Image: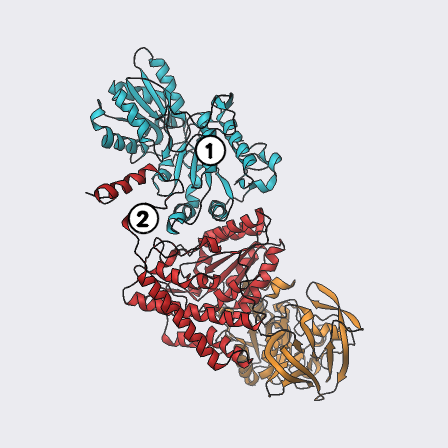
Amino acid sequence: MPTPTVGVVVNPAAGRDVRRLTGSASVSDTYGKRRAAECVLAGLDAVDEPVDAVFAPDSSRIGQRAVEEADRSGVDVLDVEVEGTGADTRRAAAAFRETADAVVTFGGDGTTRDLAVEIGDVPVIAVSTGTNNVVPTMADGTVAGAAAAFVATGAAPADAVATRHTTVTAEAADGRSVRGLATVGLVDRSFVGTRAILDPDDFLGGMVSRASRGDIGLSGIAGACTHLAPGTPRGIALDLDPDADLTVSAITTPGVVEDVGVADWGRLDPDAERTFAVDEAVVSADGERELAVQDTTIAVRPVADGPRIVDLDAVFERAPTIGE
Amino acid sequence: MSTQPDTPSADSTESMTVREAIRAALREEMDRDEDVFVMGEDVGNYGGVFEVTDGLYEEYGDERVRDTPISEAGFVGAGVGAAASGTRPVVEVMFSDFLGVAGEQIMNQMAKMRYMFGGKAEMPITVRTTEGGGMGAASQHSGTPHTWFAHFPGLKAVTPGTPKAAKGLLKSAIRSNDPVFFFENKLMYEQDGEVPTDPSYTAPIGEAAVEREGSDVTVVATQRLVGESLSVADDLAGEVDVEVVDLRSLYPLDTETLADSIRKTGRMVIADESPVSYGVHAEVVSRMVEDEFFSLDAPLQRVGVPDTHVPFSTPLEDEVVPDGDDVRSAIHQVV
Amino acid sequence: MTLISMKDSDGREEALRRMLLIREFDSTAGDLFADGDIPGFVHLYIGEEAVAVGACAALDEEDFITSTHRGHGHCIAKGLDPRRMMAELLGKRDGYCNGKGGSMHIADVDANMLGANGIVGAGPPLAAGAALTCQYHDEDRVALAFLGDGAVAQGQIHEAINLAATWDLPAVFLVENNHFGEGTPVEEQHNVENLSETAESYNIPGFTVDGMDVTAVNEAVEEARKRAIAGDGPTFIEAETYRYRGHFEGDPQPYRTEEDVERWQQRDPIDAFTEQLIDRGELAESELDDLRAEVEAEIEEAVEFAREADEPTPEEAYDDMFGEPVPEIERFANALRTDGRGGDPQ
């Protein structure tokens, strides 16, 4: 039996975009990320048996440094190319798909989505390094490391503690498409620009794979219409219009709660489609503008094929204790 | 020549200290021009460590009397940017020893901007700062670096020796569209004298003032040594007839007034509290040699700091900081 | 009114034109330098065009900028005339600085362009000062400082940011991270990956933006300007970009390979934006050709203007030291006029 292995991915760019200016998003600095990544190593010692750790390399050398400074054995850096983009995460995920028993990511929705594309069935502990994230949760690195160790060793079986997340896709008439983990949106802008959604009023509509009044952004707006638990194989389509009769109160961006006009909303079963006709818009995924489109239709649909996201509480409920 | 009156009138006067004269100049210029503002460390609510700006904060508010962080490169640099963009800052650097901290902004921005830009930038900034030993402040708070600034192209430097000169020169400095360094000797703040009260009174930059006429020897003095030289001249009255000139402006330098004086006396002592080598003294000597070689009757004498730093202990400090006795000895060398 | 409205297609075409103009200007400047027509040093902006154009497009004509030793792009983006810029590079009297500044000191105070700057990190204090003027006069104007990644290691920029942040000055600090401070990679000069982390020490927003994307830079500066005008203080933006040429013309560049450069050239800011405009149907290939031809002609004309312009006369060396001239310099100038000797030693 090979030693259980936990993969660690740190996105150095997460929590550093223009939302620090346009919203009240908090800052995630490199030093904090580095310490969090190092904490994962300590967390692995929460299980009795040895667990190996493999860090994805990154352009800020957070992963590399964690390995260089580790004072335990069984720690290594993944041998993949680094170019300083989201492709780094995807490459790491592809490697971990074959070699890791659990993966810890530090980043936002964008990072988790990049990972999701390639990670296959490996359970993912997604830790947020920003404020306006829907999928990753805030957790200490040590705790995330301990959870990963319990999952990787089977002490907390993945089938019991991880839920397969639904994803959402948006496809233009010309075949270009964007995939989101929690959301795809249509944004009233002409260019991808800074990628961030600068003004929630720019949302024309979209599709979410989860919805809660406690979520921020499009998921929060959908959550004000109806609740959709993560892992439910379904999506909610939204058609927004500032002049709509129906308005809902939602957290649209950190620091902002406002009334949003909802022209139409509805649940969609997997692979059912909702189409939007647009003259000029940018398709977003998980809060990032991704694809500029003109004079086309955009079809959005939920797909029940996302990553298996680990629920930390569920892990620790199953973790061994000395009492009964 | 110095007999020219300062512009336009100095008729009505009031007795005040150098500190009060500087404050009066700041107040008058702030009243005259809304673009004039003061900034520096502790100049606001505190009133300045030497109390020069005392009361201005209450009178003009925190926009016009601005306390800065302890950040000379930052606020001197901001002063340069502000001057280049349409305001008229008066920046106080608490001790001239700190000017090095702002060296880059002074040397490469403030001094060069107008010239580098082909004359298309105005640089109406005044830097007020304190100089001199005599208060046990030790080397890093007692220096007299004014020569550097007089030497550096693109800057003007003035060193008032009387309350009247302090007021008149500061007003000219603030009105000037060129960067002017205004050097205040710390021991002079309590020195008093008659000062014109007319708000239109200014002392032109680049003109020396004959403070006492005499025929035997010229003492060209700056700052505190002007007063000390006048006392020496009084002491020597009847024995040696001493002319005392307050140099006032180091750059530009009033060669003409000095030349007129040496033509009359044939002898000169230059008394300036700065290191003797390569200094103000040397510049005055050089100009007299160039222009008035045939008027010289005796070797020119320099009185200054003997190329040391200013030490802390009183006997040491007394040794290197020049005073009236040094001026008197120098006079006796040539008369 | 912003200098260029990138919200409409005319504005976007103008932004493209200015990026092309910068590239053509600097390519030509590089050639002229190689031919020995330009004395001194020349630092070219090629590869970084999206930063200058994106940023200046978001500014008002009345806003101030300070620049760097790599300043040609900032000048053109701010609207300076390439003819007078080229004349300055050639040391001619019709140059922006009458031939006294050269490449590293081009300035046009009338256009609120407070100068390229030969000293790394010297611009931000000046921008803080200009922002102080804006605040002091209670005007809706801002001052934007362009600075390089190398400048982030300079003490005076931190003093400037602290001052601006403490006083809520309407300033924007825009770091062009072109990945090399002179001949040393950025990661060997700084202990942080994202230079925008600098902002955290000053309690102001700091973030990183794609400096190869003109619309991204434009959006970011537009938002930063709004914050400045609202009285909320400065913003610190890091734009990730790349210089294609050496630190200076003639730099042997031992610190990188041609492949490194080619990798970044695949994301060329002009190509990327051109492609976007063509995809959007805003620009036809033929219009692009016209635009390129127009830009080439404009730079050719600038070179012609510069070549034909008069050299300054030796007497002019004595002008412009002071607003109120001093007798010391007059004396040298007079000596030149009377006996042709001037400041030269006998």
Q: Residue furthest top?
A: B238
The C terminus of chain B - image quarter: top left
* Residue C81 placement: quadrant: bottom left
| Circle 2: residue type | Glu
**Whole-percent x, y for residue B151 in the image:** 34, 39
* Residue A163 placement: quadrant: bottom right
The colour with which the image depicts chain B is cyan
In the image shown, does C226 or C294 lie closer to the viewer? C294
Query: In this rendering, would A34 be left or right of B106?
Result: right
Label 1 sits on residue: B170
The colour with which the image depicts chain A is orange
The colour with which the image depicts chain C is red
**Whole-percent x, y for residue B22 in the image:** 50, 30
Label 2 sits on residue: C316
Q: Which mark is residue C232?
A: none
Residue depth check, mark 1 versus mark 2: number of the one nearer the observer: 2
Q: Tell me the CA gap for discs 1 and 2.
A: 30 Å
The N terminus of chain B - image quarter: top left
